[in-house]
Amino acid sequence: MLSQTSPLAVAIFAFFVAVVLGLSFWLGRHARSSQGYFAAHGTIPWFVNGIAFAGDYLSAASFLGICGMIAFYGYDGFLYSIGYLAGWVVALFVIAEPMKRLGRFTFADALDAKFDSRGIKLAAAASTLVISVFYLIPQMVGAGALIKPLLGLEHYWGVTIVGVTVVIIVATAGMVSTTWVQFIKGSLLVVFCLVLVVMILVRGLTIDPYGKDGHRFRVLAEADAVAGATILPAAAEWAGKPYVRAQGVDGVVAVWRREADGRLSECQTFKVSKDKLTRIANGRPQGIGPGTGDLHPIGHLAALPGGVAATGPLSPTAFLSTVQDSTVVLWAKEEIKHPDGAITTVWSQKPTPGADLMAPGQHPLFKGIRGELPLVDPAKPATRTAWWQALWSRVDFISLMLALFCGTASLPHILIRYYTVKDQASARKSTVVGIAAIGFFYVLTLFLGLGAMTSGMLDPTDTNMSAPLLAKSFGTLPFAIISAIAFTTVLGTVSGLIMAASGAIVHDVMTNFLKIGLDDAGKVRAGKIAAVAVGVVAMWLGIQFAKVNVNFLVGWAFNIAASANLPALLMLLFWKGTTKQGITWAVVVGMVSSLAWILLSGPTFKDVYGIDAARSPVPFSQPGILTIPLGFAVLVVVSLLTRRRTGA
């Protein structure tokens, strides 16, 4: 572990959770009717709703995922920020006022405003549930990542704590409590991240304090002992005990056993030569920190411009330019597969020019967008494979950016927030406030990510912890505060998603589709039961997807939202020829096609199914470039066919 549990961190975390729960119980008296439970009676002030937009939207992906991606890949992570923010242009100029005018509680209300179609209600409800669940997964993963270093608990306990807390929030006060939790956490997140950026700039940049050769092995990772059985001569000696592996810049790999007290012993050293490991020495671990055997976090600069050792305080522009002119040590991961199926994970240093980090192309998803496509030599089949891989990488990038731009205005938990204000003007003004807060925060993420990259506090095995560990580099108190705020960030977003899912189940499916006769109190009671059920499902999925970067998971949710919801919503507003059958089939086809593509993609095969990603039948992971146009095409074709037949 790169951080140890402290009483102060636990106390601050408990205080934040207690305040959130206390607020929920206090506001619970406002949620007695279905209008109050699902839409807060439409009485939320527009400024509060705007900050709540930011609190709802700035999820674990925005804070943990983007900062982690920037910390490990540079500018590529910031591309997510650009995509997330750009999508609000659609929300402001196209969606805000019509959504308020057309609906009452849910996204289906707007789609079905002029048709009264059971098919639209069911399709829109299914879409809302699928998108909400996919968006819930990264929030739960982020919660598990936070709880492990903060409270010293395993990932599944973090997921469980978030799930239970959010279910209590939603079940006690509904949208009223959810809105104020999002307002508070949105405000705190922006303010404290600004404070953290100021601290980064005041500290400036420093070359690794241990020196270029002060420690030979710096990247350390723990794993099950079974992986070492094929490379360690005395396999039985390591049975059931975690061990640590690292690789230095000279290619030497060291393996140590971790004792019960956390110390490392019995170092065995190997030389990597292609797929073969050769044992070359025994001894105690050397050079980990200043002459100790303790674990040491990583993330440092190898060289600063001008040959200086430290810069001192920097302005925002000077900070960015200095990083660009420096040499930053990134960390490459290699998995060595053995004949018996065991895998040895090796981390190695990768000195990288800052100029490369400040341009796209470091992340595997974006590596094909830099430079020209590779040349194809007919005599060398490998060159043809490389050409296709580069092409699909570019398609993946374009598809992701398209999904981020189109998905924001299609997210159900964002759309229902328009029903919490009194009129269309308030909806528009709250969107402007939300854009300002969100845009400012995303500018901060660039500095947070680069600050984490050079902080000496990265955990290479968990990109999602980059921002909290950056705060840890300034002391326990900043770490505790940022971790607690990040936790409330998860709470706010998860509560909004569960509210959207709960409304879809009760209002769209039970009341409007199945025509179950529920009185007002019955709808509220059913909504609370639905919230519990969705929360349980979200907890289970959060445990299953524990190894995937939260930002990457959110990209998938945006793909589904943009494919299923945006074509139907835009065509309803701007094409009079749209029919109810066209809307229904557009939602269904967009949702099913994007979901199927994601479940068949390489990352899902590798990180969820445990199958070699090369066996995936689809060439790239982000489906939006195909499924968004497919949704529009299906709506137009079906509408034209059904309009002729029904005169709709």
Image (cartoon, helix red, strand yellow):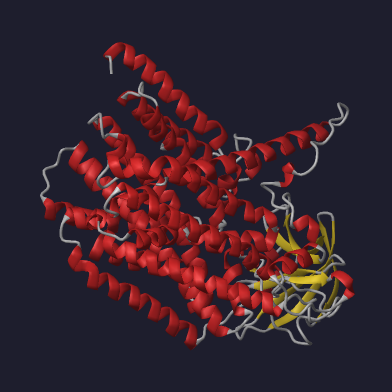
The quarter holding residue 268 reads bottom right
Camera-side residue of 589 and 160: 589
Residue lying farthest to the front in this orientation: 425
Q: Residue at x 25, y 42 (%)?
A: 508
Is 420 situated above or below 198? above
Q: Position of residue 149 (x, y in %)?
A: 54, 75
The quarter holding residue 448 reads bottom right
Residue 470 visible from this viewpoint = no
Is 178 situated above or below 100? below
Q: Residue at x 38, y 45 (%)?
A: 96
Q: Position of residue 135 (x, y in %)?
A: 44, 52
Q: Residue at x 51, y 32 (%)?
A: 627
Q: Position of residue 238 (x, y in %)?
A: 67, 73
Is 346 situated above or below 640? below
In the rendered structure, the answer to whether residue 265 lies left or right of residue 610 reads: right
In the rendered structure, the answer to whether residue 607 lies left or right of residue 130 reads: right
Q: Quadrant of the C terminus?
A: top left
Q: Quadrant of the N terminus?
A: bottom right
